[in-house]
Image (spheres, rainbow, N blue to C red):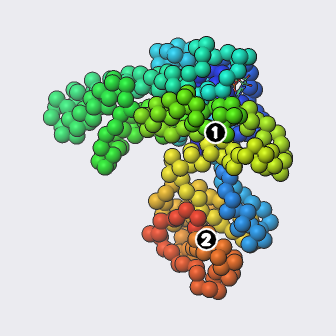
Protein backbone atom coordinates (compact mmCIF):
# COMPACT_ATOMS: atom_id res chain seq x y z
CA UNK A 1 0.00 0.00 0.00
CA UNK A 2 0.99 3.61 -0.48
CA UNK A 3 3.58 4.93 1.92
CA UNK A 4 4.84 8.39 2.69
CA UNK A 5 7.97 9.11 4.72
CA UNK A 6 8.54 12.12 6.96
CA UNK A 7 12.07 13.34 6.41
CA UNK A 8 13.78 16.31 7.99
CA UNK A 9 16.43 17.61 10.34
CA UNK A 10 16.16 16.72 14.04
CA UNK A 11 13.74 18.75 16.16
CA UNK A 12 11.57 20.08 13.36
CA UNK A 13 8.54 18.19 14.65
CA UNK A 14 8.50 14.96 12.64
CA UNK A 15 7.65 12.70 15.57
CA UNK A 16 5.03 15.11 16.86
CA UNK A 17 3.35 15.15 13.47
CA UNK A 18 3.68 11.43 13.11
CA UNK A 19 2.13 10.88 16.52
CA UNK A 20 -0.73 13.23 15.82
CA UNK A 21 -1.31 11.42 12.56
CA UNK A 22 -1.33 8.02 14.18
CA UNK A 23 -2.67 9.21 17.54
CA UNK A 24 0.06 7.60 19.54
CA UNK A 25 3.13 5.50 18.94
CA UNK A 26 6.51 7.13 18.46
CA UNK A 27 7.89 9.07 21.38
CA UNK A 28 8.33 12.80 20.68
CA UNK A 29 11.29 14.16 22.61
CA UNK A 30 13.38 17.29 22.57
CA UNK A 31 16.43 15.33 21.53
CA UNK A 32 18.11 14.83 18.14
CA UNK A 33 18.24 11.20 16.90
CA UNK A 34 15.32 10.21 19.13
CA UNK A 35 13.63 8.04 16.57
CA UNK A 36 16.25 5.70 15.17
CA UNK A 37 14.10 2.90 13.82
CA UNK A 38 11.57 3.97 11.24
CA UNK A 39 8.14 4.14 12.80
CA UNK A 40 5.24 3.09 10.75
CA UNK A 41 1.60 4.04 11.10
CA UNK A 42 -1.49 3.26 9.08
CA UNK A 43 -3.83 6.21 8.61
CA UNK A 44 -7.37 6.34 7.19
CA UNK A 45 -7.81 8.62 4.17
CA UNK A 46 -10.50 11.18 4.98
CA UNK A 47 -13.24 11.13 2.35
CA UNK A 48 -16.61 12.79 2.96
CA UNK A 49 -18.23 10.74 0.23
CA UNK A 50 -18.08 7.59 2.35
CA UNK A 51 -20.55 8.86 4.95
CA UNK A 52 -22.96 9.94 2.23
CA UNK A 53 -22.79 6.53 0.57
CA UNK A 54 -23.21 4.79 3.88
CA UNK A 55 -26.32 6.83 4.67
CA UNK A 56 -27.83 6.13 1.25
CA UNK A 57 -27.20 2.39 1.34
CA UNK A 58 -27.79 2.03 5.09
CA UNK A 59 -24.42 0.35 5.43
CA UNK A 60 -23.47 -1.45 8.62
CA UNK A 61 -20.04 0.14 8.65
CA UNK A 62 -17.64 2.43 6.85
CA UNK A 63 -14.21 1.26 5.75
CA UNK A 64 -11.91 4.05 4.54
CA UNK A 65 -8.85 3.39 2.45
CA UNK A 66 -5.51 3.80 4.18
CA UNK A 67 -2.06 5.27 3.75
CA UNK A 68 1.10 4.24 5.49
CA UNK A 69 3.21 6.91 7.14
CA UNK A 70 6.78 6.37 8.20
CA UNK A 71 8.75 8.63 10.49
CA UNK A 72 12.28 8.50 9.09
CA UNK A 73 14.70 10.07 11.55
CA UNK A 74 18.40 10.63 11.33
CA UNK A 75 19.02 13.16 8.63
CA UNK A 76 21.98 15.39 9.37
CA UNK A 77 24.44 17.25 7.22
CA UNK A 78 26.83 14.63 5.84
CA UNK A 79 24.31 11.79 5.63
CA UNK A 80 25.40 11.07 2.06
CA UNK A 81 28.95 10.63 3.39
CA UNK A 82 27.69 7.96 5.75
CA UNK A 83 27.78 10.25 8.77
CA UNK A 84 25.24 9.98 11.55
CA UNK A 85 22.81 7.31 10.51
CA UNK A 86 23.61 8.12 6.88
CA UNK A 87 23.31 5.03 4.76
CA UNK A 88 20.63 3.35 6.81
CA UNK A 89 18.62 6.51 6.63
CA UNK A 90 18.92 6.83 2.85
CA UNK A 91 17.81 3.21 2.51
CA UNK A 92 14.66 3.94 4.50
CA UNK A 93 13.83 6.83 2.18
CA UNK A 94 14.24 4.60 -0.86
CA UNK A 95 11.57 2.26 0.52
CA UNK A 96 8.72 4.81 0.57
CA UNK A 97 6.58 6.01 -2.35
CA UNK A 98 6.68 9.71 -1.50
CA UNK A 99 8.65 12.05 0.72
CA UNK A 100 7.16 14.67 3.02
CA UNK A 101 10.01 17.06 3.82
CA UNK A 102 9.29 18.46 7.26
CA UNK A 103 10.85 21.87 7.96
CA UNK A 104 10.51 24.08 10.97
CA UNK A 105 8.83 27.46 10.93
CA UNK A 106 7.65 27.50 14.53
CA UNK A 107 9.62 29.55 17.03
CA UNK A 108 10.16 28.06 20.46
CA UNK A 109 13.14 28.99 22.60
CA UNK A 110 12.78 25.76 24.55
CA UNK A 111 13.28 23.58 21.50
CA UNK A 112 16.82 23.69 20.19
CA UNK A 113 17.36 23.92 16.46
CA UNK A 114 20.35 21.96 15.15
CA UNK A 115 21.70 25.07 13.41
CA UNK A 116 20.65 27.39 16.21
CA UNK A 117 18.19 29.37 14.11
CA UNK A 118 14.86 29.03 12.32
CA UNK A 119 15.60 28.94 8.62
CA UNK A 120 13.31 26.56 6.71
CA UNK A 121 14.91 27.34 3.34
CA UNK A 122 18.26 26.31 4.73
CA UNK A 123 16.72 23.21 6.38
CA UNK A 124 15.25 22.12 3.08
CA UNK A 125 18.41 22.97 1.21
CA UNK A 126 20.46 20.80 3.58
CA UNK A 127 18.14 17.86 3.03
CA UNK A 128 17.92 18.21 -0.74
CA UNK A 129 21.68 18.60 -0.98
CA UNK A 130 22.22 15.36 0.92
CA UNK A 131 19.79 13.53 -1.34
CA UNK A 132 21.42 14.99 -4.44
CA UNK A 133 24.92 14.09 -3.27
CA UNK A 134 23.84 10.53 -2.60
CA UNK A 135 22.28 10.36 -6.08
CA UNK A 136 25.34 11.86 -7.70
CA UNK A 137 27.53 9.24 -6.10
CA UNK A 138 25.36 6.35 -7.26
CA UNK A 139 25.11 7.82 -10.77
CA UNK A 140 28.85 8.22 -11.02
CA UNK A 141 29.28 4.52 -10.35
CA UNK A 142 26.81 3.72 -13.10
CA UNK A 143 28.36 6.21 -15.47
CA UNK A 144 31.71 4.43 -15.61
CA UNK A 145 30.02 1.13 -16.35
CA UNK A 146 27.75 2.67 -18.97
CA UNK A 147 30.73 4.38 -20.56
CA UNK A 148 32.47 1.06 -21.18
CA UNK A 149 29.32 -0.41 -22.73
CA UNK A 150 28.74 2.70 -24.82
CA UNK A 151 32.19 2.40 -26.36
CA UNK A 152 31.18 -1.04 -27.66
CA UNK A 153 28.81 0.95 -29.89
CA UNK A 154 25.56 -0.47 -28.58
CA UNK A 155 23.00 2.28 -29.36
CA UNK A 156 21.01 1.63 -26.18
CA UNK A 157 24.15 1.78 -24.09
CA UNK A 158 25.08 5.09 -25.74
CA UNK A 159 21.64 6.49 -25.00
CA UNK A 160 21.85 5.39 -21.40
CA UNK A 161 25.32 6.83 -21.04
CA UNK A 162 24.07 10.19 -22.33
CA UNK A 163 21.13 10.02 -19.93
CA UNK A 164 23.34 9.34 -16.93
CA UNK A 165 25.74 12.09 -17.94
CA UNK A 166 22.86 14.55 -18.22
CA UNK A 167 21.30 13.58 -14.88
CA UNK A 168 24.64 13.76 -13.10
CA UNK A 169 25.41 17.14 -14.72
CA UNK A 170 22.15 18.63 -13.49
CA UNK A 171 22.69 17.23 -10.00
CA UNK A 172 26.18 18.71 -10.03
CA UNK A 173 24.58 22.10 -10.71
CA UNK A 174 22.34 21.62 -7.68
CA UNK A 175 19.19 21.02 -9.70
CA UNK A 176 16.67 18.22 -9.45
CA UNK A 177 17.26 16.49 -12.79
CA UNK A 178 14.82 16.58 -15.67
CA UNK A 179 14.73 14.30 -18.69
CA UNK A 180 12.41 13.29 -21.53
CA UNK A 181 9.58 11.51 -19.71
CA UNK A 182 7.89 10.72 -23.03
CA UNK A 183 10.59 8.19 -23.79
CA UNK A 184 9.57 4.95 -22.05
CA UNK A 185 13.11 3.59 -22.22
CA UNK A 186 14.47 6.53 -20.29
CA UNK A 187 11.61 6.35 -17.80
CA UNK A 188 12.36 2.68 -17.17
CA UNK A 189 16.08 3.31 -16.67
CA UNK A 190 15.58 6.26 -14.38
CA UNK A 191 13.14 4.23 -12.32
CA UNK A 192 15.82 1.58 -11.94
CA UNK A 193 18.33 4.08 -10.54
CA UNK A 194 16.12 4.76 -7.50
CA UNK A 195 17.20 8.39 -7.29
CA UNK A 196 16.15 10.00 -4.02
CA UNK A 197 16.00 13.55 -5.33
CA UNK A 198 13.57 12.52 -8.07
CA UNK A 199 11.03 10.84 -5.82
CA UNK A 200 7.57 12.42 -5.53
CA UNK A 201 7.93 14.93 -2.72
CA UNK A 202 6.33 17.88 -1.00
CA UNK A 203 7.16 20.13 1.92
CA UNK A 204 5.40 20.14 5.29
CA UNK A 205 5.99 23.49 6.93
CA UNK A 206 5.58 23.03 10.68
CA UNK A 207 4.37 26.46 11.78
CA UNK A 208 2.91 27.93 14.92
CA UNK A 209 -0.82 28.36 15.25
CA UNK A 210 -0.97 31.99 14.18
CA UNK A 211 1.05 31.43 11.00
CA UNK A 212 -0.89 28.27 10.23
CA UNK A 213 -4.10 30.26 9.96
CA UNK A 214 -2.53 32.94 7.76
CA UNK A 215 0.05 30.85 6.04
CA UNK A 216 2.26 32.53 3.49
CA UNK A 217 2.22 36.01 4.96
CA UNK A 218 5.51 35.89 6.82
CA UNK A 219 8.77 36.51 4.98
CA UNK A 220 10.14 33.12 5.99
CA UNK A 221 7.07 31.32 4.69
CA UNK A 222 7.20 33.24 1.41
CA UNK A 223 10.87 32.42 0.94
CA UNK A 224 10.15 28.77 1.64
CA UNK A 225 7.30 28.56 -0.86
CA UNK A 226 9.50 30.17 -3.50
CA UNK A 227 12.46 27.89 -2.81
CA UNK A 228 10.27 24.78 -2.81
CA UNK A 229 8.62 25.79 -6.09
CA UNK A 230 12.04 26.12 -7.69
CA UNK A 231 12.52 22.45 -6.92
CA UNK A 232 9.06 21.51 -8.13
CA UNK A 233 7.50 21.05 -4.70
CA UNK A 234 4.44 22.52 -3.06
CA UNK A 235 4.30 23.54 0.59
CA UNK A 236 1.64 22.25 2.95
CA UNK A 237 1.38 24.17 6.22
CA UNK A 238 0.82 22.15 9.37
CA UNK A 239 0.97 22.92 13.05
CA UNK A 240 2.20 19.82 14.82
CA UNK A 241 1.28 21.12 18.28
CA UNK A 242 -2.25 21.92 17.19
CA UNK A 243 -2.60 18.60 15.38
CA UNK A 244 -1.42 16.90 18.53
CA UNK A 245 -4.12 18.66 20.55
CA UNK A 246 -6.79 17.92 17.96
CA UNK A 247 -5.74 14.28 17.95
CA UNK A 248 -6.52 14.03 21.65
CA UNK A 249 -10.08 15.30 21.24
CA UNK A 250 -13.20 13.38 20.32
CA UNK A 251 -14.24 13.94 16.72
CA UNK A 252 -17.07 16.33 17.58
CA UNK A 253 -14.98 18.34 20.02
CA UNK A 254 -12.21 18.58 17.44
CA UNK A 255 -14.68 19.88 14.86
CA UNK A 256 -15.90 22.55 17.28
CA UNK A 257 -12.38 23.54 18.20
CA UNK A 258 -11.47 23.88 14.54
CA UNK A 259 -14.50 26.02 13.87
CA UNK A 260 -13.52 28.28 16.76
CA UNK A 261 -10.06 28.65 15.27
CA UNK A 262 -11.46 29.20 11.80
CA UNK A 263 -9.76 26.16 10.30
CA UNK A 264 -11.60 24.25 7.58
CA UNK A 265 -9.25 21.32 7.21
CA UNK A 266 -6.51 20.00 9.46
CA UNK A 267 -2.96 20.14 8.20
CA UNK A 268 -2.85 16.38 8.43
CA UNK A 269 -5.84 15.95 6.13
CA UNK A 270 -4.00 18.16 3.65
CA UNK A 271 -0.83 16.12 4.05
CA UNK A 272 -2.78 12.98 3.24
CA UNK A 273 -4.56 14.59 0.31
CA UNK A 274 -1.32 15.98 -1.09
CA UNK A 275 0.42 12.61 -0.87
CA UNK A 276 -2.52 11.04 -2.63
CA UNK A 277 -2.52 13.58 -5.43
CA UNK A 278 1.26 13.47 -5.90
CA UNK A 279 1.14 9.76 -6.48
CA UNK A 280 -1.84 10.04 -8.79
CA UNK A 281 -4.01 7.87 -6.60
CA UNK A 282 -7.77 7.83 -7.03
CA UNK A 283 -10.57 6.34 -4.96
CA UNK A 284 -13.42 4.13 -6.02
CA UNK A 285 -16.17 2.72 -3.82
CA UNK A 286 -18.24 -0.30 -3.07
CA UNK A 287 -21.43 0.37 -1.15
CA UNK A 288 -24.10 -1.93 0.20
CA UNK A 289 -25.94 -2.95 3.36
CA UNK A 290 -22.85 -4.61 4.78
CA UNK A 291 -20.41 -1.76 4.29
CA UNK A 292 -19.46 1.33 2.34
CA UNK A 293 -15.85 1.09 1.47
CA UNK A 294 -13.18 3.14 -0.28
CA UNK A 295 -10.43 1.57 -2.40
CA UNK A 296 -7.24 3.13 -3.69
CA UNK A 297 -5.75 2.60 -7.14
CA UNK A 298 -3.45 4.53 -9.45
CA UNK A 299 -5.18 6.60 -12.09
CA UNK A 300 -5.42 4.53 -15.28
CA UNK A 301 -6.04 1.17 -13.60
CA UNK A 302 -8.20 -1.19 -15.72
CA UNK A 303 -11.43 -2.53 -14.22
CA UNK A 304 -10.24 -6.13 -13.58
CA UNK A 305 -7.16 -4.96 -11.63
CA UNK A 306 -9.29 -2.55 -9.65
CA UNK A 307 -11.72 -5.35 -8.87
CA UNK A 308 -8.74 -7.47 -7.84
CA UNK A 309 -8.12 -5.04 -5.00
CA UNK A 310 -11.42 -6.18 -3.51
CA UNK A 311 -10.72 -9.86 -4.01
CA UNK A 312 -8.27 -11.69 -6.28
CA UNK A 313 -11.14 -13.86 -7.57
CA UNK A 314 -12.84 -10.74 -8.83
CA UNK A 315 -9.85 -10.03 -11.06
CA UNK A 316 -9.41 -13.59 -12.34
CA UNK A 317 -13.05 -14.21 -13.09
CA UNK A 318 -13.88 -10.67 -14.12
CA UNK A 319 -16.67 -10.48 -16.68
CA UNK A 320 -18.00 -6.95 -16.37
CA UNK A 321 -19.00 -4.47 -13.76
CA UNK A 322 -21.84 -2.10 -13.11
CA UNK A 323 -20.66 1.40 -12.43
CA UNK A 324 -22.17 4.69 -11.51
CA UNK A 325 -20.37 7.88 -10.63
CA UNK A 326 -20.69 9.06 -7.06
CA UNK A 327 -22.50 12.22 -8.24
CA UNK A 328 -25.04 10.26 -10.28
CA UNK A 329 -25.62 7.82 -7.46
CA UNK A 330 -26.28 10.60 -4.97
CA UNK A 331 -28.51 12.45 -7.45
CA UNK A 332 -30.54 9.27 -8.02
CA UNK A 333 -30.84 8.60 -4.30
CA UNK A 334 -29.00 5.29 -4.00
CA UNK A 335 -27.97 2.22 -5.96
CA UNK A 336 -31.45 0.70 -6.46
CA UNK A 337 -32.90 4.00 -7.66
CA UNK A 338 -29.93 4.62 -9.94
CA UNK A 339 -30.51 1.18 -11.42
CA UNK A 340 -34.22 1.84 -11.90
CA UNK A 341 -33.41 5.14 -13.60
CA UNK A 342 -31.01 3.42 -15.98
CA UNK A 343 -28.02 5.27 -14.55
CA UNK A 344 -25.80 2.22 -14.15
CA UNK A 345 -23.19 1.72 -16.83
CA UNK A 346 -21.96 -1.72 -17.83
CA UNK A 347 -18.18 -1.65 -18.21
CA UNK A 348 -15.86 -4.38 -19.50
CA UNK A 349 -12.23 -5.36 -19.10
CA UNK A 350 -10.87 -2.36 -20.98
CA UNK A 351 -12.57 0.22 -18.78
CA UNK A 352 -10.25 2.41 -16.74
CA UNK A 353 -11.61 3.04 -13.27
CA UNK A 354 -12.42 6.69 -12.50
CA UNK A 355 -12.24 8.57 -9.24
CA UNK A 356 -15.61 8.38 -7.51
CA UNK A 357 -16.86 5.30 -9.36
CA UNK A 358 -19.19 3.19 -7.27
CA UNK A 359 -18.97 -0.34 -8.59
CA UNK A 360 -20.53 -3.74 -8.44
CA UNK A 361 -18.54 -6.56 -10.03
CA UNK A 362 -19.97 -9.48 -12.01
CA UNK A 363 -17.65 -12.44 -12.01
CA UNK A 364 -17.51 -16.19 -12.49
CA UNK A 365 -15.71 -18.58 -10.17
P1 LIG B 1 11.77 15.48 15.39
O1 LIG B 1 13.14 15.34 15.94
O2 LIG B 1 11.77 16.20 14.07
O3 LIG B 1 11.00 14.22 15.34
O4 LIG B 1 11.01 16.50 16.36
P2 LIG B 1 9.95 16.21 17.53
O5 LIG B 1 8.61 15.91 16.96
O6 LIG B 1 10.53 15.25 18.49
O7 LIG B 1 9.84 17.66 18.17
C1 LIG B 1 10.93 18.24 18.85
C2 LIG B 1 10.40 19.19 19.91
O8 LIG B 1 9.69 20.27 19.28
C3 LIG B 1 9.41 18.53 20.87
O9 LIG B 1 9.69 19.01 22.15
C4 LIG B 1 8.05 19.02 20.37
O10 LIG B 1 7.11 19.10 21.41
C5 LIG B 1 8.39 20.39 19.82
N1 LIG B 1 7.46 20.78 18.74
C6 LIG B 1 7.11 20.06 17.63
N2 LIG B 1 6.24 20.72 16.88
C7 LIG B 1 6.03 21.92 17.48
C8 LIG B 1 5.22 23.07 17.17
O11 LIG B 1 4.48 23.12 16.16
N3 LIG B 1 5.30 24.11 18.04
C9 LIG B 1 6.09 24.08 19.15
N4 LIG B 1 6.12 25.14 19.96
N5 LIG B 1 6.84 23.02 19.49
C10 LIG B 1 6.81 21.95 18.67
Secondary structure of residue under mark 2:
helix
Please tell me whether residue 208 is drawn above or below residue 114 in the rendered image. Answer: below
Residue 351 on image: x %, y %: 47, 69
Residue in view at x 49 percent, y 60 percent: 301
Horizontal side of 49 relative to 185 (left or right) equals right
Residue in view at x 42 percent, y 34 percent: 230
Q: Give whichever of discs 1 and 2 has the lower sequence position.
A: 1
Secondary structure of residue under mark 1:
loop
Give the quarter of the image for residue 335: bottom right
Residue 10 on image: x %, y %: 63, 20
Dot 1: within a 10 Å radius of its alpha carbon, few (fewer than 14), some, or many (20 or more) residues? few
Number of numbered callouts drawn:
2
Residue 320 on image: x %, y %: 53, 75
Give the quarter of the image for residue 43: top right
Residue 214 marker: 1
Dot 2: within a 10 Å radius of its alpha carbon, few (fewer than 14), some, or many (20 or more) residues? few
Residue 291 on image: x %, y %: 74, 65
Q: Please give the residue where the numbered disc 2 appears in the rendered image.
A: 327
Please tell me whether residue 195 is drawn above or below residue 83 in the rendered image. Answer: below
Amino acid sequence: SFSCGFVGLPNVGKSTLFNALCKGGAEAANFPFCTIEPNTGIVPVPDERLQVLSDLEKSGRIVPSTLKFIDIAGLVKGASQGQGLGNQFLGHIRSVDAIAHVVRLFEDGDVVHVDGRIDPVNDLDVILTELMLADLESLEKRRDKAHKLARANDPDARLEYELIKSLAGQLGDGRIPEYDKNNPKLVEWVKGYGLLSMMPAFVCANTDEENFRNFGTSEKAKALVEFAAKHGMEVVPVCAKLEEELGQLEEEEAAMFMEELGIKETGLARVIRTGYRLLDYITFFTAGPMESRAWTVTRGTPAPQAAGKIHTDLCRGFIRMETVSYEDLVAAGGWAKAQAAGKLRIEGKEYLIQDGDVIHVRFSV
